[in-house]
Amino acid sequence: NKPKNIDSFLFVGLHHLAALQRKGLCIWDASRDRVFSSNLYLLFTTADGPGLICWDGMVGHSGKNGCWVYCPTPGRRKFHGTHYYPALLKPQGNCMPGSDHPDIDVFQLPLGGSSDYAYNLNRLVSAPSQRQWDMRKMETSITKPPLILGLNPS
């Protein structure tokens, strides 16, 4: 069963890893009769689509901008719906406001970018109120700062 608060589940292990990254992991080498310090790195954090949102703090595949590599391709939703779909072509007839953008050419998809992510994450965490937080969540497709950013990047 999935934990109710996934961050509280992940925090313990990531906190321990962050502490070991700062101080190193002391290991006894009995063959040389000495202690050495080992550096720890987190190499791969893999997950399926729904599991990925636990690591990156994004909205997931059904969000307004559900692109996994943070590309600026917006989704479309039905009237009175909350689920966004990655439809590149604009539906004929009535479109929901926010889903009425022009067709997106599959051969000219915009690239994702970490600089946009960093800027938008900063905008989100500096929101002065809950209302602003919620509005910026919708605009940026970032739901929270990911715990993994607390680790040493080197």
Image (cartoon, grey):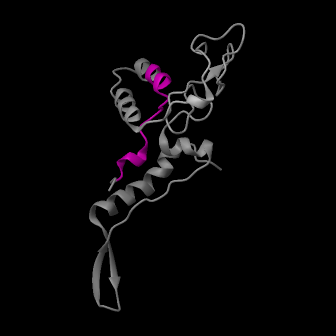
**If the image is split into quadrants, where does the C terminus sit?**
bottom left
Q: Where is residue 61 in the image (x, y as percent from the top left)?
A: 61, 34
Give how far across and how far down residue 88 sits, in percent: 64, 24
Q: Nearer the viewer, residue 126 or 15?
A: 126
Residue 32's place in the image compared with 12, above or below, is below
User: Residue 33 appears at what percent x and percent y?
Assistant: 29, 90
In this picture, which residue range is highlighted in magenta? Answer: 135-151
| Residue 85, image quadrant | top right
Q: Disc count in the image? A: 0
Q: Does 44 sit left or right of 83 as displayed?
A: left
What residue is drawn where x is 37% and y is 65%?
A: 40
148 in the magenta segment? yes
Front-most of residues 23 and 112: 112
- The residue at the point 47 percent across, 47 percent down is 8
Instruction: Look at 39% across and 28% down and name the residue there.
Output: 124
Residue drawn at 39 percent across, 60 percent down: 17
In the rendered structure, the answer to whether residue 76 lies left or right of residue 118 reads right
* The quarter of the displayed image where residue 30 is located: bottom left
Residue 48: in magenta span: no
Q: Can residue 112 be seen in this view?
A: yes
Residue 65: x and y in percent read 55, 28
Looking at this view, name the residue that lies furthest to the front: 107
Relative to 139, does residue 55 appear above or below in the rendering? below
Q: Residue furthest toward the top?
A: 94
Residue 5 visible in the current orientation: no
Q: In front: 104, or 8?
A: 104
